[in-house]
Structures are given as structure tokens and as C-alpha cells.
Amino acid sequence: MKTNDFKQTKADQDQLLTEKQAAYVFNCSVALLRERRQQAALPIYVKMGKMVRYRRQDLQDHIDASVFPVAVAVWREVKPS
């Protein structure tokens, strides 16, 4: 895979995804996505009437902000009791 295969255009970043598509991005159920949204634990969403949509870039930003540093994870596993 080429490096530029991962580049997104501005149109891609602003693309609105359905709940089902957003759940696929997060690898979770739509029910869990809705629950987390109600708890305000998810990125900004767009509400248009009864429709809920997520901007692709907001989902990616949420994922990027949720990355756990490996060094901290390893330290916690081997931390002396």
C-alpha cells in the first residue's frame, strides 16, 4: 500500500457518515454508539431532524486523541506491586 493511499481530501474529511458507518469505523454496534453519544463520550455529531451523522474527520480526531502511549501501557503491566 502506498503512503498517499491514506491521504484524505477535504471532501473526504467533511463527509457525513451514518450511525452504521460510524459504528463500523469504531468497530462497535450502533446501540453502543448511541449509548456513548448519550453519555457525551463521542465526538461532535450532526443532528438533522431525526437523522444523526458524524463527520469522518471528527471520528478520526477522536481515535487519534484516544491512542494510549505504549510506554505507559508497558509500565503499568510491569509496575512493581
Image: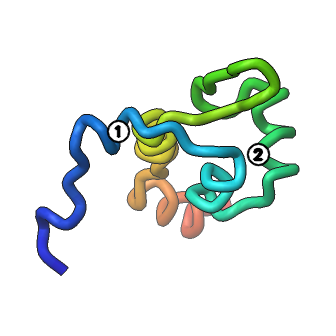
Q: Secondary structure at mark 1?
A: helix
Residue type at the position of mark 2: Leu
Comparing 35 with 30, the one in front is 30
Circle 1 residues within 10 Å: few <14, some 14–19, many ≥20: some
Q: Is residue 63 left or right of residue 9?
A: right
Q: Residue 5: horizontal and vertical position, in percent? A: 19, 66
Pointer 2 and pointer 1: residues touching (CB < 8 Å)?
Answer: no
Comparing 50 with 64, the one in front is 50
Q: Quadrant of the C terminus?
A: bottom right
Residue type at the position of mark 1: Gln
Q: CA distance from mark 2 to mark 1?
A: 20 Å
Q: What residue is shown at x 58% (from left), y 67% (from top)?
A: 77
* Residue receiving disc 1: 13
Comparing 25 with 77, the one in front is 25
Q: Earlier in the sequence, mark 2 or mark 1?
A: 1
* Residue receiving disc 2: 33
Q: Secondary structure at mark 2?
A: helix
Q: Residue 60: horizontal and vertical position, in percent? A: 43, 44
- Where is residue 35, by image quadrant? top right
Q: Is residue 37 left or right of residue 80?
A: right
- Which residue reaches farthest front? 49
Circle 2 residues within 10 Å: few <14, some 14–19, many ≥20: many
Q: Residue 55: horizontal and vertical position, in percent? A: 49, 34
Comparing 15 with 67, the one in front is 15
Give the colour scheme shown: rainbow
Q: What residue is shown at x 58% (from left), y 35% (from top)?
A: 54
- Image height check: is 70 above or below 37? below
Mark whose residue sits in front, 2 or 1: 1
- Where is residue 48, by image quadrant? top right
